[in-house]
Every structure is written in structure tokens, then in C-alpha cells.
Amino acid sequence: MHGLASDGGLFLPEEIPSFPKSFWESLHSISFQEIGYQTAKLFIGDEISEPKLQEIIQRSINFPAPLVNLNDQMHVLELFHGPTLAFKDFGAQFMARTMEHFVKDDNRELVILVATSGDTGSAVAHGFYGVEGIKVFLLYPSGKVSAIQEKQLTTLDKNIVALEIHGTFDDCQHLVKSAFTDDDLKEKLNLSSANSINIARLIPQSFYYINAVKQLKSSGKEIIVSVPSGNLGNITAGLIAKHMGLPIAKFIAATNSNDVFTKYLSSGKFEPRKSVQTYSNAMDVGNPSNLERVRSLFGDDLEEMKSEIASFSFNDDETVSGIKEVYDKFGYVIDPHGSVGYHAMKKYLSLQNKKDYDAIVVETAHPAKFKGVVENTINREIEMPERLAECIKMKKHSIILDSKFETFKDFLLSTR
């Protein structure tokens, strides 16, 4: 419920639980919801009753995460079938239902702060929309999200407030983190976060990695997963699933021109820097928070980390070429983030000269959210999902702030 520890650090379980052998033996016969329930139960224990946890899972994981086969060895994990057509819906829906459960008897309003580079904000907004006792402030970088993403962020009312920050995603994230360590704000407001800094976002994201492996028809092949990576939350969720026993041989952290993690993995030096804007904007992060979790999972052993994670970066020109190649070769329309993931998978496979494998590219958002670049690349109109088309017609409402913490703090205190 706090989101961030009092010293500014990130929460992790004291240990990552392991599934019993019987779970893996029965994996192909259980539902996605049952996977979610069995996974969450190992972390949550008796803090939520079993019937309530089952209800939370049923209400949260009520859309699919299908594995689409491009060919016998290359697959795409589609994570865009939720309310806002992005992978963040899994974590946001679960977190909203869970927090709703914990605040139902609390007389003090919970204030949730969310920094977003595009998809997180809309997923959280729709997950928490209308939930009593919770108010959500979405911080997004002005002019650095797609037009459709901005409409998804700024067209809700009730308990959702969009803050348009003159700065980058890293500025937005810095404001949120600073708020959690400010004694004055902590005393006067009941603060929490719904970014991937909150462990409750990551636990449900591990569900779909397990469900992806369940959908593979082959067995015994080496499984490789390429994850478009920015703040490193999605790959952290996958690593948690692996440490629970999921048989994934290698993760690939696919980055765009914001290649801080790629450089860290090759040099051992973490050098955060100001993010730059790209077509795959959800990955435009220059100081990824979840690196601390990744380091912790490997005992801060870089060589151990490199044995399980590879990382490659690609620029916008390469992103466009990937969208075109996937369409021309497989007839599949992939979004810019998925394109970066595809490129990274191809590069890893070529370097390793792999022959017998199952390659999974994580597709994090619906291509219609990036209509301009995708349509211009494949010379074909993309059908706009109805919920996106309706959103575009709605009127934008945002409050514009500069990126100074004092401005943000004064604003939050004025809303009490």
C-alpha cells in the first residue's frame, strides 16, 4: 500500500517462492485465472482470504494473453487485449481490485501517484476509475506520448486527474519518488504508487509468462523471451516467474535508443542519463527504477545476471524496418515496442546460432495506438478498436505543471 519504502528503496519479497512439482505437471490443464490465483497465493499467503483472492483474480484477469505463432519457432505474446490495449492492464486491474479491498474500511482517502511514459497512466486510470476512497494523479511528459495515449490519459473524470508535466518521463518519475520521501506530504496525504515501483504491479505480470509457456505446443525446446524494456518492470516480472521455476532459458532486454540497461550489462557501469523521445515511447526511460530489483534477484552478481539476460538496443529507423519485416514476412502487424523486441530476438538467435528453440517476442501494445508510424510503414490502414475510437472523440482535460518538485508539492497540498 505504501508503494515505495520509507528510505526510497523498492520492496521485494524476502524470498521468491517456488511452485510445487505438481503445478508444472498440471500446467496445460489449468486456466489463465487459475495460474494467476496459484501464483498470487504463494506471495499473499493469508493476508487476503482465498475466496476474496479468487474474486480479485476473476475480476482482474478477465481478458486473454494469446500466443500467436508466426512460424513453428517464432511466437508473439499479445498483451494488448485488456481495457486500454496495453500490457499494463494486467497489473493495473489487479492492483486496483486489491487496493480497493484494503481501503474499503479506511476513512482516509488513498492518493495514488503515477508517472507514465504512455501506457501505464491509462491502464491505471481505467483500473481505478470510480473506485471509492482512492484518488489518482497521472503525471505524463507533455508532447512525449502518442495522441491516442494522451486521450486515454486525459479524458476520464471522477477520481482521475491528469497532470501534464513540462519535462521527460524521468522528470515525472523523479517527482513521484520525491513525494514519497517528503515528510510533509507523507504526514498530510495517504500516498501510494501504481507504477512498477509497486510490487503489486509486478506479481500479476508474472502470470502471463507462465500462461505463455503453457500455450507452447512443443516441449523440451529451449525457451527464449524478448521483452521490450524501459523501466524494467516487465522483465522483472518475467525473472520472478523464472525464479519460481518457469523453464525459460534466456530473457532478452530489448531497448531503444534509451539503452542505459544494455550498456550496464556490457560494461557493469550504471550511468543514467536524460531520456530521448522515440517511436517506442513506453521505453523512453533514462533511469530505470527496477534495475535495483534485477540486481537484487541476482545477488548483485553481474556475471550471473548476464547468464540469464542478454540485451540489445535499436533506433527508430531499425524499429520501422522491424515493423515492415514482420508484416512482409509473416503478415503480422506489430507495434514499435514489439518491433524492438523482434529485432533483439533476431540478433540474439543469429549470434548464438540457435537451431532448436521456441522464441517468444512480447507485444506490449496494440499497433493502433501508434497508428501513424505503423500505417506509414506497412502502407495499410489499421482497424481502430472501438474503445480507442470512442476515446479519441472525447475532450482532453489536463493540468499543466512545470517539473519542479515544489510546484508539484504545492499542487498536491492544495487538493486536500
Image: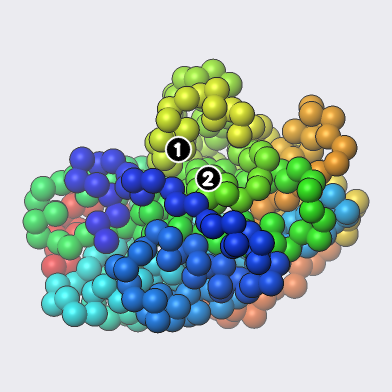
Spot occupied by residue 411 in the image (x, y as percentages of width and height): 19, 58
User: Dividing the picture into quarters, in which one does residue 251 lie?
Assistant: top right
Vertical order, 176 against 23 (above or below): above
Residue, x 55% and y 61% (percent of image)? Answer: 207
Q: CA distance from mark 2 to mark 1?
A: 9 Å
Q: Is residue 367 above or below residue 48?
A: above
Quarter holding the N terminus? Answer: bottom left
Which residue does the numbered mark 1 point to in the structure image? 297
- 171 horizontally vs 246: left or right: left
- Position of residue 199 measured from the top left corner of the image (x, y, whole percent): 38, 54
Q: Nearer the viewer, mark 2 or mark 1?
A: 2
Q: Residue at x 69, y 57 (%)?
A: 213
Image: 219 above or below 254: below
Q: Earlier in the sequence, mark 2 or mark 1?
A: 2
For residue 367, the mark is none
**In this view, 351 is above or below 357:** above
Q: Nearer the viewer, residue 88 or 390?
A: 88
Asked whether the residues under the numbered discs 2 and 1 touch, taking CB atoms below 8 Å apart as contact, a structural biologist would say yes
